């Protein structure tokens, strides 16, 4: 199934893109999507302890199940204000 | 229309945000303006670049307002945050809190900025004369009760 991945700040820079499409297996979880990215882009794995994630623009958890067409966002530590 | 929660690349206007919370039942409005300063950690800052996950940022502002209303019933909050390049001296964020009495308005405005720094999916990048650096602060977790408690303590100190 196809998901859209959104990346921001440091993660976006490591991937060289703020948005990408990924094919993932049926039954995947957010953590599986992350693993694909972390394997593909050097330096991304180091973010694992500090990232947050969102599914369809709502905060979620790495253990959440992923559906076809979902928008999965990975968020490095925030610094707004 | 009164735009309570907004993320945009346009210049922020404190008067507009303040007007969004005005209400005849309120005796106090606190307006907080966060601005870009010309130095950080001993280096001269030329400008900041902000990026946001916009739909989630707006939802985070709504969530912060909901949290504030649990502590300060009847509080009216508006939050506008800028994205893109923000020059030294310009506002990056404006918060207005209106309430019947001043203590609640001050408290809620402080609470809102503390929570924005904890859970709003917004990132700043500092640009210096000789380089640039992404700033990473808090791991965003809206359900982290101890972070929320910390924000509340700062708001009520």
Image (cartoon, coloured by chain):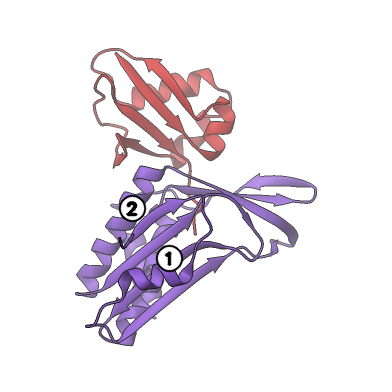
- x, y percentage for residue B107? 35, 77
Query: Could you tell me which quadrant the N terminus of chain B lies in?
Result: bottom left
In the current view of this chain or complex, which residue is farthest to the front? B1
Point out residue A19 in the picture as x, y percentages from the top left corner: 46, 27
Q: Which chain is purple?
A: B
| Of pointers 2 and 1, the one earlier in the residue sequence | 2
What is the chain identity of the residue bearing mark 2? B
Q: Name the residue located 27 percent from the left edge and 31 percent from the top edge.
A: A63
Q: Mark 2: few, some, or many residues within 10 Å (few <14, many ≥20)? A: many
Q: Chain of mark 1?
A: B
Spot the red chain and give its letter: A
Percent across and percent down for residue A52 are 39, 41
- The answer to whether residue B82 is above or below residue B27 is above
Cα gap from disc 2 to disc 1, whole angstroms: 12 Å
Is residue A37 toward the left or the right of residue B145 in the image?
Answer: right
- Snapshot quadrant of residue B18: bottom left
Pointer 1: what residue?
B113
User: Residue placed at 46% from the left, 66% from the top?
Assistant: B94
Mark 1 burial class by Cα count in 10 Å: few <14, some 14-19, many 20+: many
Residue B60, numbered circle? 2
């Amino acid at each position: 199934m196809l998901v859209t991945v959104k990346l921001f700040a440091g993660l976006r820079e490591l991937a060289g893109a703020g948005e990408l499409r990924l094919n993932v297996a049926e039954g995947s979880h957010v953590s599986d999507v992350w693993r694909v990215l972390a394997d593909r882009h050097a330096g991304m794995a180091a973010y694992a302890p500090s990232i947050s994630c969102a599914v369809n623009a709502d905060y979620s958890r790495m253990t959440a199940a992923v559906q076809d067409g979902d928008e999965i966002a990975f968020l490095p530590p925030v610094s707004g204000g | 229309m009164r735009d309570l929660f907004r993320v945009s690349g346009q210049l922020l206007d404190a008067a507009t945000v303040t007007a969004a919370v005005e209400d005849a039942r309120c005796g106090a409005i606190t307006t907080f303006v966060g601005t870009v300063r010309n130095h950080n950690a001993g280096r001269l800052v030329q400008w900041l670049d902000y990026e946001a996950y916009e739909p989630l940022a707006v939802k985070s502002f709504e969530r912060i307002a909901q949290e504030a209303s649990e502590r300060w019933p009847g509080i009216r909050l508006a939050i506008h945050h800028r994205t893109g390049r923000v020059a030294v001296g310009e506002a990056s964020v404006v918060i207005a809190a209106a309430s019947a009495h001043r203590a609640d308005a001050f408290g809620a405005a402080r609470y809102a900025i503390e929570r924005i720094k904890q859970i709003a999916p917004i990132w700043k990048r500092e640009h210096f004369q000789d380089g640039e650096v992404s700033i990473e602060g808090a791991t965003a977790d809206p359900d982290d009760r101890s972070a929320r408690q910390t924000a509340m303590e700062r708001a009520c100190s």
